[in-house]
Image: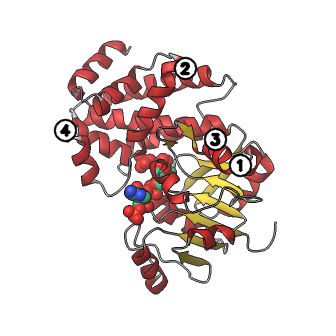
Amino acid sequence: MQERERIAVLGGGSWATALVKILSENKTDVSWWLRNKEDVNHLCQYAHNPRYLSGIHFNLEYVHPSNDILETVAQADWVILAVPAAFVKQALSPLAQDAFQGKTLVSAIKGMIPGENLLITDFLEQHYGVPAERQCVIAGPCHAEEVALEKQSYLTIGSIDLARAEMFCALLRNRYVKANPLDDIDGVEYCAVMKNIIALACGIAHGLNYGDNFQAVLVSNSMEEIERFLDALMPLHRDLKGSAYLGDLLVTAYSQFSRNRTFGNMIGRGYTVKSAQFEMNMVAEGYYAVQSIYELNKRLKVDMPITTAVYNILYERISPGVEIEILKDKFK
Ligand SMILES: NC(=O)C1=CN([C@@H]2O[C@H](COP(=O)(O)OP(=O)(O)OC[C@H]3O[C@@H](n4cnc5c(N)ncnc54)[C@H](OP(=O)(O)O)[C@@H]3O)[C@@H](O)[C@H]2O)C=CC1
Ligand SMILES: O=C(CO)COP(=O)(O)O
């Protein structure tokens, strides 16, 4: 690997901020695109992101914030996408179709392109011609807030090119981050999308005053639901007990930092979708993902009671109490 790899990070939210911290502390040059000009100016002047994880101080010798996505991408060998899935098309729209030629794309996104119901890696291949072997995904149970606090964390880098995944792992590893490569890129990407839907269900149940006993049964049933879906979509022997699958589900279902659980909790307590979105300045990917997975499952016809319940609550306005009551009778 060359000295000082050139990396672009696209996105200004919490996960982009945490990834820039990890990479730049390892003395990697990071060109960082944020959509908001004031945030870029603030970063250049004070070396802090004003609106997300604002306690992190960046070394501006290695971090180069910019508003110009064309320049940011053009300079990089590796491009990390950390924009919520719903805004990816809009964020990348200034770029030409060949803008990523010769670069490695790394998706840090745990969501799908709404409407097209595509994984990010499939979207990049179809719309920008990025071949599968030049793509990686960042998976694993890891909240940006805990990276900011330098709490021990684990990441899994998925790619069909394990050597490339290992190169990216090497850029991330530090005192508090361990990173491991894995070749099941589609499996970890789908699992990362689906665990957000389950975290919404956990939040909804909590908001309705269900306790830990119910949540434990909900989570164990959800693991079976995820397995049924993955088996129908792409049968392959995979150990779903791994931290990129079960671990990520657990952290999102139980953590105080989970956006999806928090959003679900508000829905369970009676907020409307609009008011819950208004209340959070962050994005709960599961809200969009449940529609994509529900649509995909019209073809697959897998038994997915939890996904169906969350879809009915968020998109059909069926009462959370009614839907969780139905689930209650299905669980063993
Ligand atoms: N946070 C975490 O711990 C982790 C997050 N991820 C994934 O990372 C991805 C990015 O999420 P995260 O960093 O958490 O985001 P946050 O929820 O922290 O922040 C929201 C981001 O979305 C942007 N945004 C909001 N509305 C719009 C819009 N209308 N158009 C364009 N951009 C908009 C915001 O930009 P602005 O501030 O300019 O409004 C901001 O960058 C997601 O897929 C998430 O699942 C993965 C692992 C961990
Ligand atoms: O994926 C995550 C942690 O691994 C983040 O989940 P939330 O978006 O629910 O906070």
Pointers 3 and 4 in contact (CB under 8 A)? no
Q: Is mark 4 within 8 Å of ligand 2?
A: no
> Of helix, strand and loop, which one carries label 4?
loop
> Of helix, strand and loop, which one carries label 3?
helix
Residue located beneath label 4 in the image? 269
User: Is 40 positioned to the left or the right of 153 in the image?
Assistant: left
Q: Earlier in the sequence, mark 3 or mark 4?
A: 3
Residue located beneath label 1 in the image? 129
Q: Earlier in the sequence, mark 2 or mark 3?
A: 3
Q: Earlier in the sequence, mark 2 or mark 1?
A: 1
Q: Nearer the viewer, mark 2 or mark 1?
A: 1
Residue located beneath label 2 in the image? 228
Q: Position of residue 63 (x, y in %)?
A: 58, 77
Residue located beneath label 3 in the image? 122
For the residues marked 4 and 2, what is the alpha-carbon distance in whole angstroms?
Answer: 30 Å
Q: Amino acid at mark 3?
A: Asp
> Of helix, strand and loop, which one carries label 2?
helix
Q: Nearer the viewer, mark 1 or mark 4?
A: 1
